[in-house]
Amino acid sequence: MRTAAWLGALAALVLAWHSAAAQSSAPVASIPLVSNWRKFIDPQEQAFEVDVPQGWKVTGGTVRRNALQYRNWVSAIAPGGATILGLNDPGEWSYVVPTPMLAMAGFGVGSLYNGGGGTLYTVEPYLDGSQFAVRWGGRKLQRLCGSIKLTGSRERPELTGQINAIAGAWGIHHDAGEASFACVKDGMQLSAYALTDVVSISGAAGAIWYAETIVGFLAPSPVAGVAAGLLSHMVKSVRVNPQWVARNSNMSVQVSQIAAKTNAAISDTIMNGWESRGAAIDHVMEEGSRARLGIDIYSDPRTGTKYTVANDHKFYWANPAGVVVGTDTDTAPQGFSRLARVPP
């Protein structure tokens, strides 16, 4: 009797283990397939408009430190929260290079210097485009994921040349560079990318410098190329309001045209750097592209939302929050509904 009871208990344990295994699910690298965009208009000053993915959580606008120092910015977060696209940073301002004169006046590195007219500058050594992208990206990721690693950084002299030809002026110099990172969140490998255009201006107190443009994304690594394509589209779609420029400058048309050309150059640079990893988002529906990139397309029959997923499971499921999981058995995880493969 004792042996029979032990075998019965063992059988029950095995059955329970199989049942749990059938129900198990793993987070899947995924990103909603964006087929519809909407216009986001700066709610504070109507300074700009930009295309953002329909259905994503979008925040942004114009923030000011004072009348002369302002920052236009946008952040778009995908349903489920795994992918973030960003244009500029509302907490990033201007710097002045340390000099003996500033040091004598008590303004050491890290201190805040009043440049007159209400302008404020943090005393910091100059960073070029790639150096700034490394520092900025590493700092921002500390709040978003763990196990952060810098995977690469480089100057982009071809983009620097283009921007200086478009927007350069007397005493003003642009310097573009980029950085890429890897990190982990909730057990999922993520990739991050930052491209920055740093401006330096010579002045009586030394060189004033700041990142005029900061663009970047954070996304699950297998679909990072898709995020790059979405970011590229957003950058190219930015349009500055000439009336807003006119209130801040007497060269409204010229400034608007310069901004459009500069954004187009930055957008093309992002696409060129990521095209081999899926940045050509208009081709992800093709069967050959899916196989080459290790991704597939699935749709939620309830909502019509399409997801680009890493092709490493047999079945895919989504919950109402947009979180996607994958299983190798046709058993729905609790709270999730089955997704259907979208044919090419």
Image (cartoon, rainbow, N blue to C red):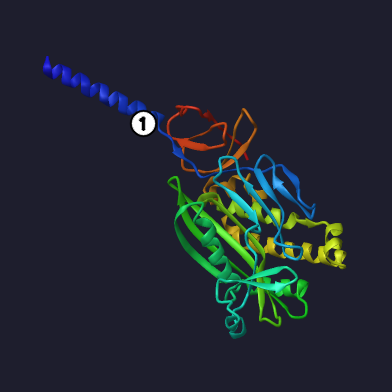
Q: Looking at the picture, how far across and down is residue 167, in whole percent? A: 77, 72
Q: Quadrant of the C terminus?
A: top right
Tell me where residue 172 appears, x and y as whole percent. 73, 77
Of 183 and 156, the residue lying toward us:
183
Give the residue pinned by disc 1: 21
Assign the N terminus to one quadrant of the image: top left
Residue at x-position 47% and y-position 37%: 326
Q: Secondary structure at mark 1?
A: helix
Quadrant location of residue 186?
top left
Amino acid marked by disc 1 = Ala
Q: Does any portion of residue 200 appear in the rendered image?
A: yes
Measured along the vertical axis of the image, is residue 207 above or below residue 149? Answer: below
The residue sitting at 59% across, 50% down in the picture is: 84
Residue 19 picture location, percent across and down: 35, 26
Is 284 above or below relative to 105?
Answer: above
Left or right: where does residue 128 sit relative to residue 315?
right
Furthest residue to the front?
A: 105
Q: Quadrant of residue 25?
A: top left
